[in-house]
Image: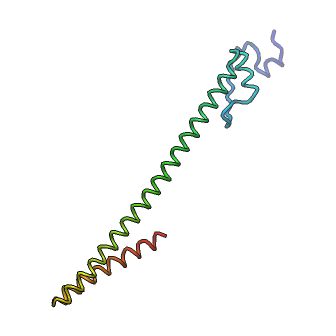
Amino acid sequence: MTDSKDLRNNTVNQPHRPQMLMAQFSSPLPPPEILANYDKAQPGLINKIIETTETESNHRRELEKQKLLAEVNNLQRGDELIARAQVFAFVISIVALIGGCITAIFGAQIAGGIIGVSGLVGIITAFIKNSKRI
């Protein structure tokens, strides 16, 4: 006969159910308790896990360092290109101003004015765009 306590707890003839434990941790290495279990399962495994973690961390740091250096180089190269473009724009604008003056002196005042004004507009536009970016 079954006991009434067993019926209330539903423990009569119930098979054991397997249980699974899931743990999550945020450090590169598991907690020491879990590491000890690994070492029990396979001696020396802790050292391999630690070495692998150190190697992976060093590799990740090296990649981050290379990425940062590449970004700095790109920024420096971009600054050099911007400076070169500003020099070329200035030279072209000065040539346009001088060409407009020479054209106006030789009798084509309207054409000289248009050429000279386009040179001034180029300088002013470049100055305004660069001042907005800063």
Farthest residue to the left: give it. Answer: 107
Q: Is 19 placed left or right of 93 in the picture?
A: right
Quarter of the figure with residue 128: bottom left
Depth check: 34 or 67 in front? 67
Rendered residue at 46%/69% (across/down): 133
Quarter of the figure with residue 121: bottom left
Quarter of the figure with residue 55: top right
Depth check: 86 or 127 in front? 86
Relative to residue 88, is residue 119 depicted above or below?
below
Relative to residue 41, is residue 26 depicted above or below?
below
Rendered residue at 58%/40% (across/down): 61
Farthest residue to the top: give it. Answer: 1
| Viewport quadrant of the N terminus | top right
Q: Position of residue 132 (x, y in %)?
A: 45, 72
Relative to residue 4, is residue 83 depicted above or below?
below
Relative to residue 82, is residue 121 depicted above or below?
below
Rendered residue at 31%/78% (across/down): 94
| Count of number-bearing discs | 0
Depth check: 38 or 53 in front? 53
Q: Position of residue 46 (x, y in %)?
A: 69, 22
Rendered residue at 67%/27% (across/down): 50
Q: How is the image coloured?
A: rainbow
